[in-house]
Image: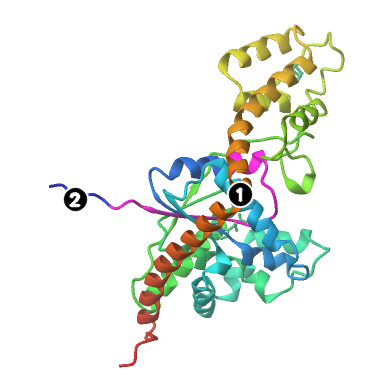
Amino acid sequence: MASIKPRKRVLSGMRPTGKLHLGNYVGALENWVRMQDEYECFFCIVDWHALTTDYADTSHVKENSVEVMFDWLAAGLDPQKSVIFIQSHVPAHAELHLLLSMITPLGWLERVPTYKEQRENIKDKDLGTYGFLGYPVLQAADILAYKADVVPVGEDQVAHIELTREIARRFNGFYCEVFPEPQSLLTPAAKLPGTDGRKMSKSYGNTILLTDPEPLVRQKLKTMVTDPARVRRSDPGNPDVCPVGDLHKLFSRKETMAKVDEGCRSAGIGCIECKSWAADALVQILNPIQERRKKFEDNPRLAWDILEDGTKRAKAAAAETMKDVRAAMGMSLELN
Ligand code: TRP
Ligand code: SF4
């Protein structure tokens, strides 16, 4: 009898910054939902990572974690298939972070592009902290605690996964072969514009939330920027340079896309009509997500049970790794 090959293990995480938007969905979540059938998946709400920047005011961290949890379940992460949990509920991440911090050279951390960039760009918080410099070590601990093979992330995280590999290699070299070297799996970069035409992002205030009700989605679309060359209704436009055109490409059916393409270029349709079709497509995607969310919001006990079960499973998996880690370092908890 052929033996069944064990599925590769996936771990990914998201910082709890509040309700998720369509950009989070097409940029990550939608892909995670698909991966659940092929991999053994661990999805972690990384609330300790939120503290690396928001340490002075922690009052929203917990409520944001809960929002993310609801959005994940609403989007279709399935506790029957995946382990869904909150980082701070699994203290092994902290233990591994500490041990990895011992072997991580400062220079590696100082060279991480996101570190340099954020130190320069974020001026309203003092990021000259030990914890902020150690952000990628904590991320490495998240990944290595589960001996993950694959880490689905966006482009901006590739350097962190590379660093994780370097830390794993260094650990394996000093002690013994404990960690596989995880590969990053780039989420196909769907360019999702926000209502102002820039990349959809919470910090730009241009988002469409997964929880936005239909009238709000329609209203946001009405104010969305279009091809700037199309000033009057009689001017022809170009969907390839229009953020609304981008939405159609991502979400509309082929027939609608064809109508948009033809109508826009010939000035046969107006932008108002075109936007209402884009809104139709968005609403169709959001409807089932919002229905699922309602089920959990109406019965939060369901979500807590899922979280409790996920925590248990994550703890068990991380505990196995930590046994190997302690043994490799000659620090097993057993007396001998
Ligand atoms: N740093 C990631 C981000 O900002 C979040 C994260 C933390 C993560 N731990 C992780 C992603 C582990 C993947 C795997 O998006
Ligand atoms: Fe954009 Fe549609 Fe207007 Fe063309 S018709 S400019 S695609 S909103």
* Image marks 2 and 1: residues in contact by CB distance under 8 Å: no
State the residue at coordinates (77%, 32%).
216
> Based on the displayed image, in which of its 4 quarters is residue 264 positioned?
top right
Q: Residues within 10 Å of mark 2 (few under 14, many from 20)?
A: few
Q: Name the residue type under label 2.
A: Ser
Residue under pointer 1: 70
Residue 16 seen in this snapshot:
no
Rendered view: 159 above or below 320: above
Rendered view: 156 above or below 213: below
Between discs 2 and 1, the one toward the N terminus: 2
Viewer-nearest residue: 142 or 179: 142
Q: Is disc 1 placed on a helix, strand or loop?
A: helix
Rendered view: 193 above or below 138: above
Span highlighted in magenta in the image: 6-28
Expressed as whole percent of the image width and height from the top left, the position of residue 240 reads: 68, 22
Side of 288 where 272 appears, left or right: right
Q: Residue furthest left?
A: 1
Q: Is disc 2 placed on a helix, strand or loop?
A: loop
Side of 270 where 255 appears, left or right: left
Task: Mark 2 and ligand 1: say if the CB distance to the nearest ligand atom is below 8 Å.
Answer: no
State the residue at coordinates (43%, 58%).
182
Rendered view: 236 above or below 136: above
Expressed as whole percent of the image width and height from the top left, the position of residue 329 reads: 39, 82
Residue 14 marker: none
Expressed as whole percent of the image width and height from the top left, the position of residue 162 reads: 50, 59
Task: Mark 1 and ligand 1: say if the CB distance to the nearest ligand atom is below 8 Å.
Answer: no
Q: Quadrant of ligand 2?
A: top right
Q: Name the residue type under label 1.
A: Phe
Residue 3 marker: 2
Which is closer to the viewer, label 2 or label 1?
Answer: 1
Magenta stretch holds residue 22:
yes
